[in-house]
Image (cartoon, rainbow, N blue to C red):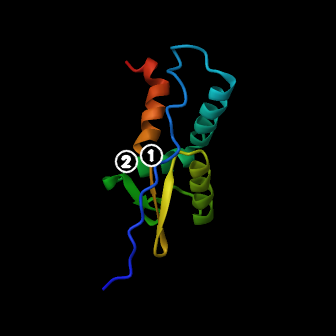
Amino acid sequence: MSNAKVLPLLEPDVVACCPPLTERPLTAEEAVRTAAMFKALGDPVRLRLFSAVASHPGGEACVCDISDVGVSQPTVSHHLKKLKEAGLLSSERRGTWVYYRVEPPVLAAMGHILGGYAA
């Protein structure tokens, strides 16, 4: 018999924070939240890590599968932490590895903000 516990999944605190940029000017609070998201993605390594997680089969990636971005492992960990702090990634430790995922509401919120520019 296993002693494994099934833990409930927590919903991320991600809400479509802002209207499409073409709808109306952002409030100061909306601009702060949106800027934090784009600032986190403004670094090429972070953008590559975010893309690697978002495009990984199954919707999540082990840090061991996405670490090859041309920087050291401590730097990868730093950038993943920044993406988590910005609310762009969530993570779960499984044994010695950490698995990262981009929650669908995050992608939906990003698409919503930029939606007015879609061709």
| 33 on left or right of 51 | right
**SS under mark 1:** helix
Within 10 angstroms of label 1, few (less than 14), some, or many (20 or more) residues? some
**Whole-percent x, y for residue 42 in the image:** 60, 38
Residue at 54% over, 26% down: 18
**Whole-percent x, y for residue 3 in the image:** 38, 82
Residue at 60% over, 45% down: 86
Query: Does residue 26 sit above or below 64 in this rendering?
Result: above
**Whole-percent x, y for residue 59 in the image:** 36, 52
| 13 on left or right of 33 | left
Q: Where is the C terminus found, in terms of image quarters?
A: top left
The residue identified by callout 1 is: 51
Residue at 42% over, 65% down: 7
**SS under mark 2:** helix
The residue identified by callout 2 is: 55
The furthest residue to the right: 28
**Whole-percent x, y for residue 43 in the image:** 60, 43
Query: Does residue 17 sit above or below 116 in this rendering?
Result: below
